[in-house]
Image (cartoon, rainbow, N blue to C red):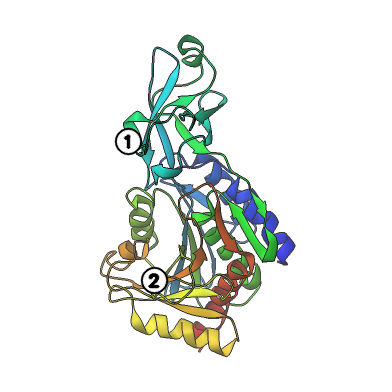
Amino acid sequence: MNKKELKKLMTVLCQENGISGDESDISKTARKKLKKYCPDARIENGNVIGSLGNQNPNAWHVLLDAHMDKVGLIVTSITDDGFVTVGNVGGLDRRWFPAQRVCIHGTKSIYGIISTLPPHLASGEEKVQKIEQVRIDTGYDAESLREFVSIGDSVTFCGYTGELAGGRFSSPALDDRSGMAAIFYALDEIWQEDLDCKVTVLFSNREEVNGCGAKTGCFSINPDIALAVDVSFAGDGKLCKTGKAGEGAMIGFSPSLDRGLSQELVAHAIHEKIPYQYEVMNGRTGTNADDFAVCRDGVETCTVSIPLYYMHTPVEVVDVNDVKNTGKLLAAFLKGILND
């Protein structure tokens, strides 16, 4: 898979609907694309699962995970004056809500704007609205709007999807569609290899709210090793909790992760000359790895993260080279360490 194909894949994945608990659109697309590498690809309890490699029950079994869902909103009511009220789905910063364009996924797509007060009419410092105060203006009156929109419908933020200068890529939902793209990149490198291990891919649901997909998926798959491929905070790289965009995958080191597995990933990155960096955490990782590590009688687990700017906003940004090198690292690990 070349970079042009990778960027095309990232665009397709990022543009699919799929907030937590409403992942049907992205799951269908993910299953269709996974079929190329895993003929048994299926949707199971909301997750997309498929396997390849050595199917011998005695072979090492490795789980590659990236979550499909993204943050968003959910309709809580339609007011008599035609506004839509919402609740948040996942962690959202309401400071950037005013004047955002959104799409309500009812019986048809309804576009709207989150209401804001013009600065000419504002007096002093305006406080950040509580979620209960947020109002979406669609232009419809209440009666017309109720024909298409119901309580419980999902709402997504509209944003630009495409390239920026310097090899950067911006879109809503790069958390964690970029992780999905990295796994697809790895699969493209290994799917015709004679692997000694079994590889199962899990594109999990509801990571942003309760990690349900990781819990049920890992229990069903029952792997020996699990790699949670997610995003993490990009910055100047000087803080242990931030990585530097363009300098490779962030390999997790944490008391909650398997240190030997972290070191093995570093060794493969060095051997294959794949750019990498450390992500040091002092406890829980905030990813699906936390659930994998304690699944059944325990799973050797590590995180492999892509540095991302502006997390949980409609303008998330990654470096395409980091997505590619994350995929290369996953492929090197699967082709190398388990064949020794």
* Above or below, comparing residue 76 to residue 69 in the picture: above
Query: Could you tell me residue 230's position as x and y percent?
Result: 46, 63
Residue carrying label 1? 130
Residue 336, labelled with which disc? none
In this view, the mark in front (2 or 1): 1
The residue positioned 50% from the left and 38% from the top of the image is: 156
Residue found 28% across the figure and 76% down from its top:
255
Residue 40 vs 304, above or below: the answer is above
Q: Quadrant of residue 242?
A: bottom left
In the picture as drawn, the residue positioned furthest to the top comes out as 143
Q: x%, y% of residue 276?
A: 52, 79
Q: Residue at x 73, y 67 (%)?
A: 2
Q: Secondary structure at mark 1?
A: loop
In this orientation, which residue lies closer to the viewer: 128 or 235? 128
Number of residue marks = 2
Give the side of residue 286 with respect to residue 111, left or right.
left
C-alpha distance separating marks 2 and 1: 29 Å
Q: Going 42% across and 49% down the picture, which residue do you hit?
A: 205
Q: Which residue, given by chain and number where applicable, does mark 2 sit on?
A: 241
- Indicate the amino acid at tag 2: Lys
Percent of width and height locating residue 134:
39, 30
Three-letter code, disc 1:
Lys
Is tag 2's residue or tag 1's residue first in the polypeptide sequence? Answer: 1
Q: Quadrant of the N terminus?
A: bottom right
Q: Tell me if label 2 and label 1 are in contact, CB under 8 Å.
A: no
Res. 78 in view: yes
Residue 301 in the figure: left or right of residue 3: left
Q: Position of residue 258 (x, y in %)?
A: 34, 78
Q: Nearer the viewer, residue 49 or 165?
A: 165
| Helix, strand or loop status at disc 2 | loop
Q: Tag 1: Cα neighbours inside 10 Å, few (<14), some, or many (≥20)?
A: few
Specify few, some or many for label 2: CA neighbours under 10 Å numbering under 14, 14-19, or 20 or more. some
